[in-house]
Structures are given as C-alpha cells and as structure tokens.
Amino acid sequence: MTQPTVKQVWEWLETIPDPEIPVISLVDLGIIREVAWEGDILVVSVTPTYSGCPATTMINRDIEAKLRDSGVHKIELRRRLSPAWTTDWLTKKGAEALEKYGIAPPQQAGGPKRCPHCGGMSVERVSQFGSTPCKAQWRCRDCFEPFEYFKCI
Amino acid sequence: MSGKVDQLALFEFLLRMGDNTLILGHRVSEWCGHAPVLEEDIALANTALDLIGQTQLWLGLAGDVEGKGRTADDLAFLRDAWDFRNVLLTELPNGDFGQTLMRQFLFDAWHVVALGQLVRSSDPRVAEVAAKASKEAAYHMERSAGTVVGLGDGTDESHRRMQDALDYLWPYAGELFESDDVDRAIVGAGIAPDPAGLRAEYDTLVSRVIDEATLKVPDTTYIQKGGRDGRMHSEHLGHLLTSMQWLQRAYPGCEW
C-alpha cells in the first residue's frame, strides 16, 4: 500500500476516544504530540496525562489497533515526557464536549466556571480528586447536583 | 556530559528518588477502602497512584543507567529491604488519618522544593521526570497542607492528634536533608542540588503551614536516619515488602 500522509494519520487518531472519557478523542485531549514517518516506520509520540494514569496502557493499545486496522503495520509508539502535558493542550472542541457530557472543563482560575448541568455559578469543591487522576469532585449549590471538574494543570 | 558522571552514584540517586515515591505510594495505597469518607479514600488512592507512576519513571531511568537490563518492575519487586534507598519517613506505618496526612505534608513540602530544583538538572532525563512530577507534587501539597490546617486548627482531639503526629514524624523529616558521597558526586555533576541546601526553603514553607494549623514544630534537631543510604531501615520496611512483593515471591516471574 502507499504510505498514508501524516494528515491522514491525524484524522484516524482523531476518531479514537479517550478510554475513560469517551466523548473526547485522544487528539482533543492533547496527548498526541507528533506523528512522523521515519523511513517506513510510523512514529507516534504520546505524552502521559498523569504519570500514574492507568489508561496509558489502553491508550497505546487503542492507537496501535486503529493504525493496524487502517493498514499501517510498522508502528512505533514513543513516550514523550517533555514538555509535560498541560490542560492548555485540551482543544476547544474537547472542552465543549466535556461540558456537554457533564464534566466542567479546566479553568486557569483553578475551579469550574459554572455547573455543567444547570449553568449555575454558585459551585463548591467536594474533593480535589475524583474518579480518574484528571478530575476533581464539585457540587452545584443551585441545582444541588454533584459534578466532575477536569483539573487544571 | 554523562560520560563524566559517576554512573553508580547516579543510579543510587535515582533509587533514592524512586524508592521514596514507591514506598510512600504503597503506604498511602493501604488506605484504599479504609479512609474516613469516600472523598478522602479517593484522594489518597489518587495520590498513591501519582507516586507509583513517578516511581515507574525514576526506577525505569535507574534501570537504564545501571545497564543490566533491570526494569522498574524488577527493581520494585525483586530487591530485598537492604537494597532500598527510601527515607525512613516513607516506610513508617500509616498511624491514624491525621498522621498519614501530616507525613504526606512533610514529604510533599520536601518533594515540591527538591523537584523545583531538579527541573534544572544537567541531565535532561532527570529534568523531564522532575518537570512531570513537580506538577503532581504541587497538587498533592495543596491538599495535604489544607488538611493539616483543617485538622490542626480543628477540634481539641484533631489538634492533639496532629501535634502528636508532628512530634513523632519531625525527626524523620530530617533525613531528607542528609548528604553523603553519593550526593557530593551528583551535586558536583550538576544533576541535583545538595539536600542540605533545601532545608531553609523547606523550613519556611513548613512553618507557614504549621503556624496556620496552630501547631508547633518540635524543638529538637535529632534526626532518625538510615534509610536513604540503606544502612539501617526500620523493621517496618520488611513487613511492607512481604505484602507489596507477595505475588513475585510466591510466583517468580509471573506476568499478566
């Protein structure tokens, strides 16, 4: 087969959902740092969100499976630590999808802007941590619903 | 650069970093399913997860530097107590919730100060692990410091327990600032700062939080040491390892 273009590969990667938050793709999450051909080997550089995130293994497996299904067989996944992942790399599309799904997107101020359920501005933190390493638990004082907030790092 | 660095000293240094996060991460994970409320349970488990993730980076690099083909898993699960290089503080049993959080704060404060210097390491591999870990450490400290203040400046009982925890743990914190030949070699190569040089910044940071918590730093300079050079671990480490390494001891080489 002819070598798919880097642009084509990015498009494939954009269809892979994050295993823990399936409404956003790995590309939206900002963890795919580079796609490049080195000779006939496709090198994909991936950065971890949190160093102990258990989804990392599954993410690598999903990338490999997607590329194999698309006909690429010589694949090398490289872990890239530096620069360290930041929520600034989350795409705008990703942030919107998170909020629609009920997870408040990260804010520089360190807390959610509003409740993702009712839009209420009166929110309080329940815990700095949540169900995955990337989230914290908050609660809305207007609709009284708990919700998750995507930690800003 | 790396040609001139004493590789054995670098290996020891990396073990010290990785064993601290491994042993503390394991201790903190012992709270999983036992914390006073669900949110605290999740917070402790996530802190443990970050620490164990950092361990994979430090011990993975240690294995690379050693050059004998040992992986992070090999180093974590196939060494015995005398080969561990964590400070005694990290291997102490958890005690009550307050003591666990006080230890976490005393460790986090050191971690934040030390990683803040290590991001400028002359070895880019060390610098990039430090940059990754420092973000997580800062987040841990925000929580442990907040909890120390909440419990210290809380009820009579929580205040008493936090002061007891600080009195008990303070001599152990001193080991984080000890220096030996390994440190001299590493400092000389620009890989890491001299541990003793971190003390002033640490003391300032710790006193600010301890004051706010209405607690008092004990008036002692005595240091409990013997972990970071492996000369004398406490008996607690062996017990911890029998649990942490159980699977590899019962089924050597087991993978799944």
Image (cartoon, rainbow, N blue to C red):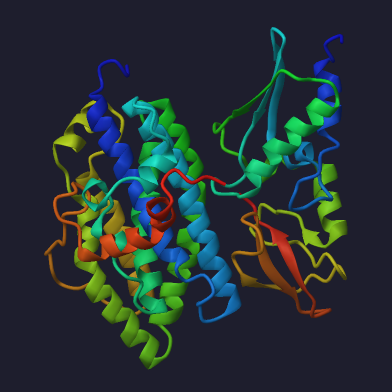
Residue A22: x and y in percent read 81, 50
Q: In this view of the protein, can residue B136 be seen by the observer?
A: yes
Q: In this view of the protein, can residue B58 be seen by the observer?
A: no
Please give the name of the residue rendered at 72% of the width and 9% of the height, measured from the top-left corner.
A40
Q: From the viewer's perspective, is residue B121 above or below residue A103? A: above
**Front residue of A36 and B142:** A36
| Left or right: A140 as drawn, with respect to B209 | right
Residue B28: x and y in percent read 43, 65
| Left or right: A140 as drawn, with respect to B185 | right
Q: From the viewer's perspective, is residue A128 above or below residue A8? A: below
| Left or right: B219 as drawn, with respect to A97 | left
Q: From the viewer's perspective, is residue B96 above or below residue B14? A: below
**Front residue of A149 and B4:** B4
**Front residue of B93 and A117:** B93
Please give the name of the residue rendered at 61% of the width and 50% of the height, measured from the top-left corner.
A54
Q: Residue furthest bottom?
A: B156
Within the image, what quadrant is residue B245 found in?
bottom left
| Left or right: B236 as drawn, with respect to A143 | left
Residue A56: x and y in percent read 64, 43
Residue B86: x and y in percent read 28, 51
Q: Residue furthest front?
A: B251
